[in-house]
Image (cartoon, rainbow, N blue to C red):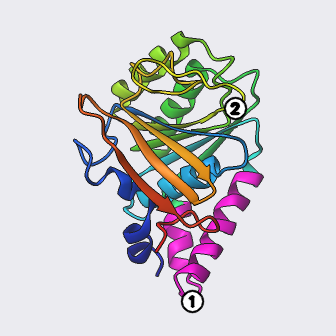
């Protein structure tokens, strides 16, 4: 089975030494990276880390169809089996399918109200209450700060942790006084954990930029395998 070996090399290892050991219920987290560096892969790894622990998860795809997201999960599971030298097993796939829901929205129609209606429907009709919500594809440049204020309230209301991906740009070097880069430089007060996914000539690194209310700079980074996005070495 994948899950025991995967949890040992999951990118979420970067939070093991953080002030709270993880993101936590009611909190918001975000991965910041340029296009093509691996934001979606890291979000799916976070999803799998939760799913293999049999936590209920909703994957929200903004601007992508559900079939494409399902294909991403299948491809990453297959890559994990190869990387961890494990034989194929339906048990891992079934754990993922039983504990995951996928919601797909057009970029122009996604809102906190729509997401809450979907969550309420899942709770009332399916007895499916999410522990974790993944939101991939949201355009941070167009999103109002009020959106994140409202989704923070949603996270608290349903006691779910919510992870986002945010697209940065090579030509925009803006950072705030805390060193948080664009496009999260105006939103860092609403996020509890901020992680930068950085591609360098030495490899791909995750850097922990914000660690809850820890006032000391985290100065924590881990290197990822550029093919699997698991811990390198």
Label 1: state its secondary structure: loop
Query: Which residue is rendered at x = 34% and y = 26% of the image?
Result: 156
Against 147, residue 90 (above or below) is below
Query: Which residue is rendered at x = 57% and y = 74% of the image?
Result: 80
**Residue 117 appears at what percent x and percent y?**
55, 25
The residue to which callout 2 is attached is 169
Which is more toward the observer, 14 or 203? Answer: 203
Query: Which residue is rendered at x = 37% and y = 62% of the image?
Result: 53
Which is more toward the observer, 187 or 180? Answer: 180
Q: Are marks 1 and 2 in contact (CB under 8 Å)?
A: no
**Residue 206 appears at what percent x and percent y?**
48, 50
The residue to which callout 1 is attached is 87
Q: How crowded is mark 1: few (under 14 residues within 10 Å), some or many (20 or more)?
A: few
Residue 157 badge: none
| Quarter assignment of residue 110 | top right
Q: In this view, does 114 lie to the left or right of 72?
A: left
Which is more toward the observer, 18 or 72? Answer: 18
Against 200, residue 173 (above or below) is above
**Residue 188 appears at what percent x and percent y?**
43, 22
Q: Is residue 182 visible?
A: yes
Query: Which residue is rendered at x = 43% and y = 60% of the image?
Result: 49
Q: Is residue 104 magenta?
A: no
Q: Is residue 85 magenta?
A: yes
Against 77, residue 179 (above or below) is above
């Amino acid at each position: 089975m994948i899950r025991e070996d995967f949890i040992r090399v999951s990118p979420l290892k970067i939070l093991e030494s953080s002030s709270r050991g993880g993101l936590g219920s009611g909190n918001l987290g975000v991965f910041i990276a340029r296009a093509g560096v691996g934001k979606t892969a890291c979000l799916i790894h976070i999803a799998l880390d939760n799913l293999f622990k049999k936590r209920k998860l909703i994957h929200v795809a903004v601007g992508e169809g559900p079939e494409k997201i399902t294909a991403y999960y299948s491809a990453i599971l297959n890559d994990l089996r190869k990387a961890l030298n494990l034989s194929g097993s339906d048990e891992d796939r079934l754990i993922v399918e039983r504990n995951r829901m996928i919601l797909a929205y057009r970029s122009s129609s996604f809102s906190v109200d729509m997401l809450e209606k979907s969550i309420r429907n899942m709770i009332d009709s399916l007895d499916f209450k999410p522990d974790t919500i993944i939101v991939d594809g949201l355009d941070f440049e167009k999103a109002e700060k009020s959106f994140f204020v409202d989704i923070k309230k949603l996270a608290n209301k349903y006691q779910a942790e919510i992870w986002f991906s945010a697209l940065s740009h090579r030509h925009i070097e803006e950072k705030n006084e805390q060193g948080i880069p664009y496009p999260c430089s105006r939103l860092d007060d609403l996020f509890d954990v901020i992680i930068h996914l950085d591609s360098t000539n030495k490899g791909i690194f995750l850097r922990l930029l914000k660690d809850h209310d820890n006032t000391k700079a985290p100065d924590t980074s881990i290197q990822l395998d550029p093919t699997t996005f698991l811990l390198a070495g």
